[in-house]
Image (cartoon, grey):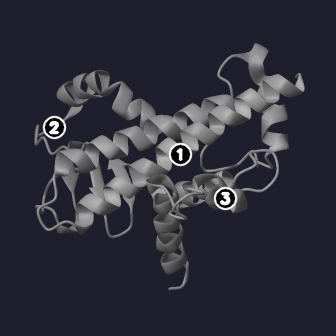
Amino acid sequence: MEKMVLKIFQGEIEKQCKFAIIAVEQVKTELANTNSNLDLVWYAIQNFLVAVANISKIFWPPKLKYQKRGEELRKSLDIKNDSPIEPRKFRNHFEHFDERLEKWATSSKRHNFIDSNIGPLNMMIAGIDQQDFLRNFDPTTWTLTFRGDKYELKPIVEVIYDLYSKDGPLQIGRYVRHFCLNQRTGILDPFAKLIDNIYCWWKDHHSH
């Protein structure tokens, strides 16, 4: 792959990392708000899944003829083949929700429909079949579930943040404050503050 094309792909990865981080920050903000808008939580989660899936498709192209490109990009950014950002199953659950709903309608035994719920599954109404829980987000563990499938968000967020802050090809990380600093006022712009916030969040998480 030509160096210029490689840089363009790396720039797109950087952009999608930004989108994913913004989505995570929005989830955090809404969960911390006593009058939180749950629709905004799901809006942000869906945006996060789309951004991560876009990164996944760049690193692991679905079409065989582009697989060499994916290999080169993974090598350039030191992405392991077993990275948690590779699976796109949960993005597909959201993108093809109509098909999932059709399948639920024909396979559910009791037709208890529980969707877009926020909370631990073990605190839900007893006696509900696991297959009747569609989109569920547990904010205590940052885990998504969909009809029995489980998707841990924390390892994915960590990889996204590490990728975004990586020195080297993406030319960000330690330089993000330099580029975001307003040279006249000496004040960080909102996105630099967002990066600081997300870093502090993960620092707190790993300190426990």
> Residue 18 — which label?
1
Residue extending farthest to the bottom is: 208
Task: Indicate left or right for 96 with 84 as reference.
Answer: left
Camera-nearest residue between 7 and 52: 7
- Please give left or right for residue 113 compared with residue 195 in the image: left
Question: Quadrant of residue 4 in the image?
Answer: top right
User: Could you tell which of marks 3 and 2 lies nearer the N-terminus?
Assistant: 2
Q: Position of residue 37 (x, y in %)?
A: 16, 52
Task: Look at label 2 and name its amino acid.
Answer: Lys
* Residue at the spot 50% in from the left edge and 73% down from the top edge: 200
Judged by depth in the image, the label closer to the viewer, 1 or 3, is 3
At label 1, the amino acid type is Lys
Q: Is residue 8 above or below residue 134?
A: above
Task: Please name the residue shown 33% across and 45% down the image.
Answer: 44
- CA neighbours of label 1 inside 10 A, class few (<14), some (14 to 19), many (20+): many
* Between 97 and 111, the one nearer to me in the picture: 97
Sequence-earlier tag: 1 or 3: 1
Q: Can residue 193 be seen by looking at this rendering?
A: yes
Badge 3 is on which residue? 178
Image quadrant assignment for residue 123: bottom left
Could you classify mark 2 by the number of other residues whose Cα lies within 10 Å: few (under 14), some (14-19), or many (20 or more)? few
Q: Amino acid at mark 3?
A: His
Q: Quadrant of the N terminus?
A: top right
Mark 2, residue position: 109
Q: Are marks 1 and 2 in contact (CB under 8 Å)?
A: no
Query: Helix, strand or loop at disc 1?
Result: helix
